[in-house]
Amino acid sequence: MSFWKDKRVLVTGGTGFIGSHLVDRLLVEGAVVRVCGRSSSCRGEVEYLCGNLMSREFSQRACESQEAVFHLAAKVAGVGYNSKHSGTILYDNAFVGLNILEAAVSCGVERILLASSACVYSRDSAVPTPETEGFIGNPEPTNLGYGWAKRFLEVQALCYTTQYPIKIALPRLYNAYGPRDDFSWETSHVIPALIRKVVEGGDTVKVWGDGSQTRSFLYVSDFLEGLMLTLEQYPECDPVNIGSEEEVTILGLINLITKIAGSQAHVEFERDKPLGQLRRIGDCSKARELLGFKPRVGLSEGIGRTISWYRDQQSG
């Protein structure tokens, strides 16, 4: 029997990219799902609460009668937006994190997943980056506000578990991608932004930096597996990297996307724009050993699925 069968589960951010996929998966596993957010685009089997998690009263109402919480709601976007809105991103994410954790404790929630991020790591972290480097130096400058907000979230978790009998999972999440991702020009991450540029037929794809930056990307179904395994098997208030160890340069990623999309677009580098972190890839050995976590969808397959989905949306 599934661990999640008949469990009452709240998903914050449940109408977003990751959250909507997680809701679908939890329903398949037999969970009784509640979603809170500002958009009501939910499946009929889901209880939906419309409101703002910046409100302590709403956070309390959202957590009432729940056995588990996935706290995925976050204010974050791509490098351009993040670097210009550090204060807002820090404040909003830290405030909501405090509200939801306080509400979970007050309502007697048994376990909660607080989604942390690879953005806690500094620009000078070892590569691949182990969890032990989460509080060394400052977070990478282009994600300064978000990185500190996630560090604060982890400190909150530590303090609350020393005082209250709540189980907290702390996955440090690397870049996710896949269908339903954010494809808007202002707030999208690198993969949806590149797919949109290529699929919409531009002759030139402009890319920030020089293309030498490296990243690892985790397809959404594998991302969900990591989230659910962490909350089910390791709610120990101990950070665990969840990501892929398949490292790719941004130039290599562009070439892969153009090849799969059948595009002849020319790449133009904007070298005066922020590079972001030069290399970002996690040491995911802890997740393998503790959770048996191993990504199943390779980058080429995942990019192909995402391009197909985006084209279907455009033609529909």
Image (cartoon, rainbow, N blue to C red):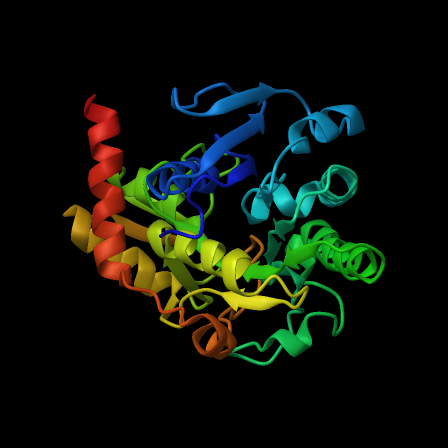
- Going by the picture, which residue comes out furthest to the left? 262
Q: Where is residue 228 in the image (x, y as percent from the top left)?
A: 46, 54
Q: Position of residue 92 (x, y in %)?
A: 74, 37
Report the residue at 61% width, 36% height from top. Answer: 66
Please say if 256 is above or below 64: below
- State which quarter of the image contains the C terminus: top left
Q: Is residue 121 visible?
A: yes
Q: In which quarter of the image is residue 12?
A: top right
- Left or right relative to 43: residue 262: left
- Left or right relative to 38: residue 256: left
Q: Where is residue 264 in the image (x, y as percent from the top left)?
A: 18, 49
Nearest to the observer: residue 206 or residue 168 = 168
Tag count: 0
Nearest to the observer: residue 67 or residue 88 = 67
Q: Where is residue 52 in the image (x, y as percent from the top left)?
A: 68, 24
Please say if 131 is above or below 230: below
Q: Is residue 203 visible?
A: no
Nearest to the observer: residue 176 or residue 153 = 153
- Left or right relative to 197: residue 147: right
Report the residue at 60% width, 38% height from top. Answer: 73
Nearest to the observer: residue 65 or residue 291 = 65
Q: In which quarter of the image is residue 275?
A: bottom right
- Left or right relative to 139: residue 270: left
Report the residue at 63% width, 49% height from top. Answer: 112
